[in-house]
Amino acid sequence: MPKSMVVAGVMSGTSADGVDVALCRISAARDYGDSPRIKLLGHAGFRYSKAVRAAVLAAMDAKNASVADLSRLNWRLGEIYADCVEKASTRLGIKIDLIGCHGQTIYHQAVAEKYLGSPVRCTWQMGEASVIAERLRVPVVSDFRPADMAAAGQGAPLVPMLDYVMFRSAKVNRVLQNLGGIGNLTAIPAGCAIDGVMAFDTGPGNMVIDACMQRLRGKAFDRGGAVARQGRIISSVLTSVLAEEYFSASPPKSCGREQFGADFVSHVISVCRKARANDADIVATATALTAESVSQAYQRFVWAHLGTAAPLAKTEFVVAGGGAKNAALMTMLGERLQPLGVKIRLMRELGVPGQAKEAVAFAMLAWLTWNGVAGNVVAATGAKRPVVLGKVTHG
């Protein structure tokens, strides 16, 4: 039977704002076939410096990134992740047995495009695992997404395995919505088995809001949604943008800066300006885009899934990620979801701080990999079979 381990999960999301480290004690279930037991021991967050964040965002610009800078950034991020894990371990006074490091997504192409005469799908998460393993002398599991993609999956989302293990309920439907750079949700009907889970990326989370704030106000994000509260939503722009094919495409599906990055933001700002929008109006419209895309995803895809599986169950909509701190965004979500009979909750109410959740997920996925257990949810990623995720670098 696998032994109990203290695992550090390391996550740096699409917002590229910093690193979250979650230290978890993970042990095998008491009964064969049950889920592992996970206890969050502590969590620490670390912001990227302005220079590092700028380098990460520049690396995501595939048209202009240099090979030399990409290689250097990969190694520098390895050092940064090692620093963050070491600081978290010291701060919390906890010795680590294993590290699960998601890395920084630089490019994610889940849909095949022809390259050198053949269709290719690909993904790339940076952060040299050898640097982390050597620094801390602890084995590292990294590069989680390619195994799922090799099995015909989208490589995302991967957090649904944690959602199912920790948050499923016999009596309550749960929709777990993360609002990081990208928005993603996991829908778990009451009492369902793993093959009853639905999960997919809903579209932009904070990414477009943050980019608008950076361009228009020179700020990294809209603190508390203060700017959005000052503006008006440009309905014509919102309707036009939501007509983009991604929003109506059926799951499984995943997205990133490739769909909602710099070019998309330029388009949103341009059409808002044509509608005589000021800066606050643009931020308000970007915020409404996230809220409306989440609401539409729920109504288009999730409602029927939950209703068919458990028509009499109550539904909780549990929000995590940086977007949960944006009061304007949360108000807009409430205005759209509460009339549907959905109760909105915050992830911390279920015992896990919202900012820690994805880091906890990669701690658990690393533990599964270390023990040779599949970590993808095929209903979420579209893979043809369950696979063991990641690569192991020994310390």
Image (tube, helix red, strand yellow):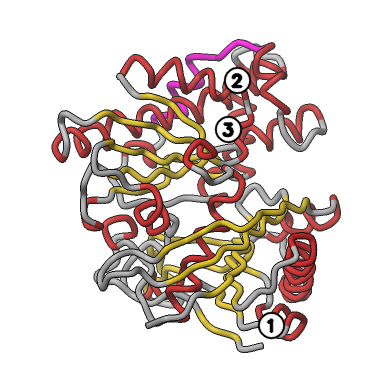
Looking at the rendered structure, the secondary structure element under dot 3 is helix
Is residue 106 at least partly visible in the picture? no
Instruction: Residue type at mark 3: give it.
Output: Ala
Q: Where is residue 132 in the image (x, y as percent from the top left)?
A: 71, 78
Instruction: Residue type at mark 1: give it.
Output: Ala
Asked if 22 appears above or below 267 in the picture, the reply is below
For the view shown, which residue lies furthest in the front direction?
30
Point out the tag, 1 or 2, that comes first from the N-terminus.
1
Q: In which quarter of the image is the C terminus?
A: bottom right
Side of 266 where 301 appears, left or right: left
- Nearest to viewer (mark 2 / mark 3): 3
For the view shown, which residue lies furthest in the bottom direction?
394
- Using the numbered discs, state the Cα–Cα distance from disc 2 to disc 3 in whole angstroms: 10 Å
In magenta, the rendered stretch is: 231-243
- Using the numbered discs, state the Cα–Cα distance from disc 1 to disc 3 in whole angstroms: 33 Å
Looking at the rendered structure, the secondary structure element under dot 2 is helix
Instruction: Residue type at mark 2: give it.
Output: Ala
Residue holding disc 3: 324
- Using the numbered discs, state the Cα–Cα distance from disc 1 to disc 2 in whole angstroms: 41 Å
Asked if 203 appears above or below 6 in the picture, the reply is above
Asked if 368 appears above or below 351 in the picture, the reply is below
Residue at (74, 56) in percent of width and height: 58
Side of 22 where 3 appears, left or right: left
Residue holding disc 1: 133
CB under 8 Å between discs 2 and 3: no
Residue holding disc 2: 328
Q: Where is residue 55 in the image (x, y as percent from the top left)?
A: 78, 58
